[in-house]
Image (cartoon, rainbow, N blue to C red):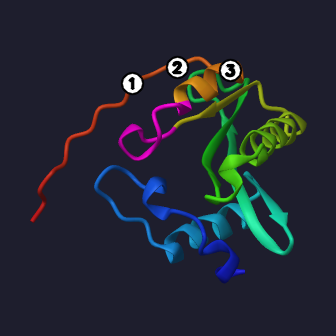
């Protein structure tokens, strides 16, 4: 599986300026797969992984009577980006999260590592921006 997974671009999966290794990405996916709150969907074509989406189901931080499905990772291979795999995989995750009883689905991406058109893709799928996150690096050494 690692060979098929190696076709992904890992630089887009981490925070700006942070390299995310294949090993760390696979470890995160494995943790989600073994968590009762984790949901992992994998798209395969001809034995190769074309895409993966990982989500976590949690209580809503602001309203504990509702649940939120947070899509933590959504990636497709370079070859699959030309087709419909990405949106089909995302929509399949939405359906899976609905089965888990979520009231809201959230997803985000790191702007400096992702193509600019993703905002349009999210809006076309019915998502609205809800927050802006600021970051400052702290030198602890």
* Left or right of residue 67: residue 43: right
Q: Name the residue: 58% across, 72% down.
A: 27
Is tag 3's residue or tag 2's residue first in the polypeptide sequence? Answer: 3
In this rendering, which labeled residue sits more in front, label 1 or label 3? 3
Q: Is residue 113 in the magenta section?
A: yes
Residue underneath mark 1: 132
Q: Which mark is residue 65?
A: none
Q: Name the residue: 73% across, 51% down.
A: 37
Residue numbers of the magenta segment: 109-118
* Left or right of residue 82: residue 102: right
User: What separation in Å lies between label 3 and label 2 (alpha carbons)?
Assistant: 12 Å
Q: Position of residue 130 (x, y in %)?
A: 51, 19
Quarter of the image for the N terminus: give it: bottom right
Q: Nearer the viewer, residue 36 or 136?
A: 136
Q: Nearer the viewer, residue 41 or 117?
A: 117
Q: Position of residue 100 (x, y in %)?
A: 85, 40
Quarter location, residue 21? bottom left
Q: Name the residue: 9% across, 65% down.
A: 141
User: What separation in Å lies between label 1 and label 3 (alpha carbons)?
Assistant: 20 Å
- Residue 131 lies, with reference to residue 25, above or below; the image says above
């Amino acid at each position: 599986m690692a060979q098929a997974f190696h076709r992904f671009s890992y630089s887009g999966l981490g925070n700006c300026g942070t390299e995310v290794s294949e090993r760390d990405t696979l470890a995160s996916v494995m943790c989600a797969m073994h968590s009762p709150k984790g949901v992992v969907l994998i798209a395969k074509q001809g034995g190769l992984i074309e895409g993966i989406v990982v989500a976590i189901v949690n209580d809503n931080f602001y309203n504990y009577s509702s649940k939120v499905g947070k899509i933590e990772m959504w990636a497709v291979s370079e070859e699959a980006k030309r087709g419909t795999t990405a949106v089909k995989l995302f929509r399949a995750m939405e359906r899976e999260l609905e089965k888990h009883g979520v009231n809201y689905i959230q997803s985000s991406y790191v702007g400096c590592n992702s193509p600019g058109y993703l905002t349009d893709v999210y809006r076309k799928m019915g998502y609205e921006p809800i927050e802006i996150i600021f970051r400052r690096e702290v030198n602890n050494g």
